[in-house]
Amino acid sequence: MDQTKGQRAFVPKSFIDAKNHQRKLDAYKNTVIRFLLPDNKAIQVCFYSQEAVSSIHDFIESLFVNQNIKYDLCFFLKEKLQRDKFKNLIDAGLAPKSNLILSIKENVEQVFDNSRFHLATLEEANALSAEWLSSNARYEPYNPTVGPESQTSQNKRSSTAVDENHGPPPQRRNVDGLPKWLKRN
């Protein structure tokens, strides 16, 4: 590590996690999610990053023609995204941009009301995604460091030392109120 920047400070992981969480809340206003469909199409949507994960499920269910359709939302490693009212999109690791696989058994053409969608090319979808994400700020993780000036100032001895090897002579305190066994003769 470059000594001019300082060394990493010794702080609790919970403190760093809390700082990083707050920085993500401040930076990520919008989250873009692409739902990848079985027929090599995708549905792209912009959510507020502080919305609950359950709002993603509510959105998908609102697109279905029939409300009794069974589905799963999965990450690429087949981990399912559970419906959660208390976890926001940042806490779920979806912000600022994610792809979710929409796994359904039925035919896609029969599941969705296609009149509600605007078909776009990948380039148009990427441009729209960039526009939605433009309101986000840049996220920089919290990296606690101790500058070199604070390290050396704590470790230096005072310049009043008489002997360079042994330091200043000890100061004698007023010993009147001490018990006999503690007093020096």
Image (cartoon, helix red, strand yellow):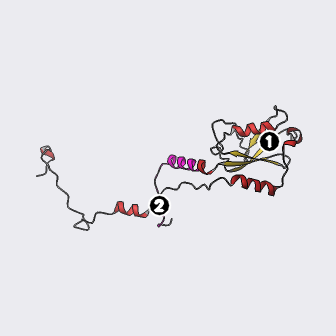
Q: Distance between the residues labelled 2 and 1?
A: 47 Å
Vertical side of 54 occupied by 138: above or below? below
x, y percent for residue 30: 67, 48
Q: In this image, 57 relative to 86: left or right?
A: right
* Foreground pick, 135 / 21: 135
x, y percent for residue 19: 53, 49
| Residue range corresponding to the magenta coloring | 3-23
Q: Residue sitting at 38 percent across and 63 percent down?
A: 152
Near mark 2 (Cα within 10 A), the count class, few <14, some 14-19 or many ≥20, is: some
Q: Which amino acid does label 2 sit on?
A: Gln
Q: Dot 2: what SS?
A: strand
Q: Residue sitting at 51 percent across and 46 percent down?
A: 14
Q: Residue 7 carries which label?
A: 2
Instruction: List the residue tagged with mark 1.
Output: 103
Q: Is residue 11 magenta?
A: yes
x, y percent for residue 155: 35, 61
Q: Is residue 6 magenta?
A: yes
